[in-house]
Amino acid sequence: MDLLRFITAGSVDDGKSTLIGRLLYDSKSILIDQLEALEKQSKNREDGEIDLALLTDGLRAEREQGITIDVAYKYFSTPKRKFIIADAPGHIQYTRNMVTGASNANLIIILVDARNGIVEQTRRHSAIASLLNIPHVVVAVNKMDLVNYSQDVFNNIAIDYAEIARKLDLKEVTYIPLSALKGDNIVDPSANLSWYEGGTLLHLLENIAVEKDVNLTHPRLPVQYVIRPQTEELHDYRGYAGKIISGIYKKGDAVTILPSGATSHIKTIELGEKEVDEAFATQSVVLQLEDDVDVSRGDLIVKNENKPNLGQEIEVMLCWMDTKPLKKGNKYLLQINSQRVRSVVKEIEYKLDVNSLQKEFEQEEALLNDIVKATIKTASPLSYDSYKELRANGGAILIDETSNVTVGACMIQ
Amino acid sequence: MSNYQLDYLDQLESEAIHIMREVAGQFERPALLFSGGKDSITLVHLALKAFRPGKFPFPLVHIDTGHNFPEALQYRDNLVNRIGERLIVRKVEDTIKSKKLTEPKGKFASRNVLQTYTLLDTIEEFGFDACIGGARRDEEKARAKERIFSVRDEFGQWEPKKQRPELWSIYNGKIQKGENVRAFPISNWTELDIWNYIQRENIDLPSIYFSHEREVIQHESQLVAVSSYIRVDEDDKILRKKVRYRTVGDMTCTAAVESEASTVHDIIREITATKTSERGETRIDDKISEAAMEDRKKNGYF
């Protein structure tokens, strides 16, 4: 059984939480006590229907306001797959929370209200899906019950969206009509949508191919921790512990340590206290090297034939996530996996207007939820890949050194 | 199909090991909160995979309510002996005495809330800057919202509306003095994942997880073990039933379920067929209000 991580996005009231509630409900992943609690709360509602959104809105403030503020993670499995759902907020002021949920997703479901068609949040979330390079996009046209299950309405939205997908270079886009509230086309095919020839949403989620989402061609192992038992029999043992984020490593492979450039060969690979001949992404391993080279946390172990970029200046697409503005000349800590270096924002080239998808040049600063293209200079050499090519080693966060808060997400170009 | 594909349990395992090593790499004085329950036992198993042949870079810390199942305590001591790691025990009893705290009263007077005081005192006593906990997001809906690295202020409080963005597998453990981080390596595991992993890895558990005979009283729909920590009233009927525990918390706030399951395999079969959630079936302390867990977390609970 494999694992699919997906996120639901869309505007406020497009029915994201209801969709998740429906998936859990129709796939029988909601248990009796949870359902009873739900019925009890739904009684206060005027329409008297069970409010499936209450399943995911876990904070008091969310239930009071009837909106999603932060990502909620939900889990369900079918005999085919385990699913991790990130239920992300739709409201613009919580975009950074949506980015949090989207960063690990293999797939994004973008909900569109059939009555309203494509709105600003659809474009914003699609832009984020494109920036974060989420491999699979599903455009779910929801509330089909409110437009009499009209095929024309669905087709027109699909045509409109195809234009956005083209501009944003979204490759794998699937369109699906449904009603989360009524349960049409979620788990079971719907007679109301007999004109639709594709599978149900769950069928799609169960069958989309995810194995290609893990990169096996660019070996990268960020060192997290050095294991040194310092006992009598393991006196000289130095094990470099980390998760292989991409690629394959074999015993005997020639490796380079970055940023130092030191070279050696792999002596042993240990996986959960057992020695193995090879290991691959995304296993957590311990490597021992043949030579006594200097390796510590933050270093990247790569193979000689496939090296990342090494440099002190990077161009990034940056999603700003703090209430204090980002200004040219500001200094931050930049972290990629276990590497952390000081950095300074050298240039803000343009801001991306997520509504028109136009570039706005001559920007002095970036405000909360802005997406900008920027140049960042680092105090010491950084080993990185382009985000488009290798998501696992091309994403970085910016940390404000005075507040310690994560303030920016960078996708290295 | 390629040979380089990981099963979902392997993916969850690797993610958890990665998180533990991030804690070890980023903090000066981490600790692993150990309760004797299956989730923290799983954490210890993962820590062995993460740090052997070295020592754990943290001690195990048990906040002892004094209302533990004796089987869980015995298991704890055997485990610590076997793996040769350091265990720190701090007792809620001592906090109650030294701080003159008021013990809750009532039929199932639970020290669950008082536990937070002892935990915060222990964090201060040892200067822990990160505590690894076995919380899972599927347990409860406030937990479903929490980050993997969850920053707590100097009062241990969680501020759900001010959580840091947490992207990819990059964890920001930078904190101010006095703050600490609660790190949750098995956030993305469900109850069933834990049991499947226990089965796959052949992890030993305290005997109370398996079917055994016990004297219980029925309270509303839940079965509570008869012990000196709960009050048995005249109209309570003491029953002898075959039960097992789905969670191991305090004897006062953890209910048993009727079960014949004597192996992990049987338990997995029962859970797959069950219609009630883990906390709903067995946690008396969560039933208090819709926001019971959110409120406890805001006050420093793990």
Image (cartoon, coloured by chain):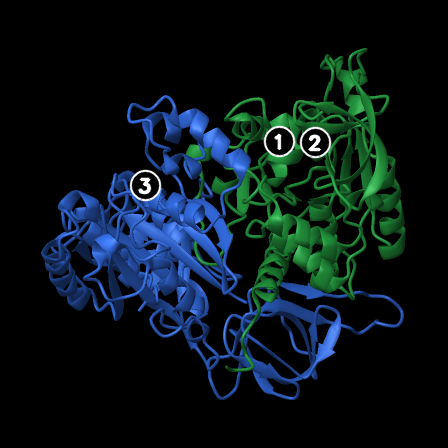
Horizontal and vertical percent position of residue B215? 85, 29
Q: CA distance from mark 1 to mark 3?
A: 26 Å
Q: CA distance from mark 3 to mark 2?
A: 32 Å
B284 lies above or below A260 = above
Q: Mark 3 belongs to which amino acid?
A: Tyr
Q: Which residue is mark 3?
A: A94
Q: Which chain is disc 2 placed on?
A: B
Q: Quadrant of residue A159?
A: bottom left
Say which element carries label 2: helix
Q: Which residue is mark 1?
A: B301
Q: Which mark is residue A250?
A: none
Q: Which residue is mark 2?
A: B119
Q: Which chain is green?
A: B
Q: Mark 2 belongs to which amino acid?
A: Leu
Camera-side residue of B111 and A260: B111
- Direction from residue B69 to residue A242 in the image, left or right: left
Asked whether residue A12 is in view, the answer is: yes
The residue drawn where x is 36% and y is 34% is A51
Does the CB distance between marks 1 and 2 fall below 8 Å? yes
Say which element carries label 1: loop
Q: Which chain is disc 1 placed on?
A: B
Camera-side residue of B283 and A353: B283
Mark 1, Cα crowd under 10 Å, few <14 / some 14-19 / many 20+, is many
